[in-house]
Amino acid sequence: MIRTVEQYLKSLEDGRQMWCLGEKVKDVRSHPYIQNIIRSSAMDYVLPNDPRFKHLFVTKDADGEDVNFLLTAPKSAEDLLRRRECFLTGMRSGGGIVLHCMGIDALTACTVAAQKMDKNLGTNYVKRVEAYRTYLQKNDIGITGAITDVKGDR
């Protein structure tokens, strides 16, 4: 699935609770600190729907459905070069960064770790990670990751 900007914006009206600087946000779409992030994130839905960039941002999944290329696992050097071109196109568009790429790289790292675990422990984590990737593709959902230092007395 390739969502439109309108579908993305509508998805933000789901009753989520968000806080900013200690205050509850009533409307994420109009909050002065958050609306720029939303505008930048919307580029993830502008570019794949733009005929000039569809060849770059859209690919087919195993079922033959259109999905965002950035939600797929790179399988070749060509895939990595294409990802780079997606990033550059997103940055040049004025939208800032392409958010679909942020957490999907972490998910790809999870796949690598899961492969080692499955081999050594006889588990099936790769299947689970890839099922989550498929869910993201089918719903055109970007994810992100966060890194922070360990808290507390170590």
Image (tube, rainbow, N blue to C red):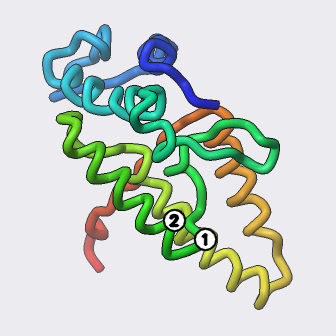
Q: Amino acid at mark 2?
A: Asp
Q: Kindly indicate whether the residue at mark 1 contacts the one at mark 2 (C-beta within 8 angstroms).
A: yes
Structural crowding at the residue carrying mark 2, measured as other residues with C-alpha within 10 Å and reported as few (<14), some (14–19) or many (≥20): some
User: Which numbered tag is attached to residue 79?
Assistant: 2
Among the 4 quarters of the image, the one containing residue 119: bottom right
Find residue 57 and report its horizontal and vertical position in percent.
Answer: 48, 43
The N terminus, quarter of image: top right
- 122 above or below 147? below
Q: Residues within 10 Å of mark 1 (few under 14, many from 20)?
A: few
Q: Quadrant of the C terminus?
A: bottom left
- Which quarter of the figure has residue 115? bottom right
Q: Residue at x 79, y 50 (%)?
A: 62
Q: Residue at 45% of width from left, 54% of height from top?
A: 103
Percent across and percent down for residue 76 are 56, 74
Residue placed under numbered mark 1 in the picture = 75
In the image, taking residue 17 as reference, residue 1 lies left or right, namely right
* Count of marks, rendered view: 2
Q: Is residue 152 above or below residue 119?
A: above
Work out whether 99 lies above or below 129.
above
Q: Position of residue 80 (x, y in %)?
A: 45, 68
Q: Residue furthest right?
A: 122
* Quarter of the view holding residue 12: top left
Tell me the element at label 2.
Answer: helix
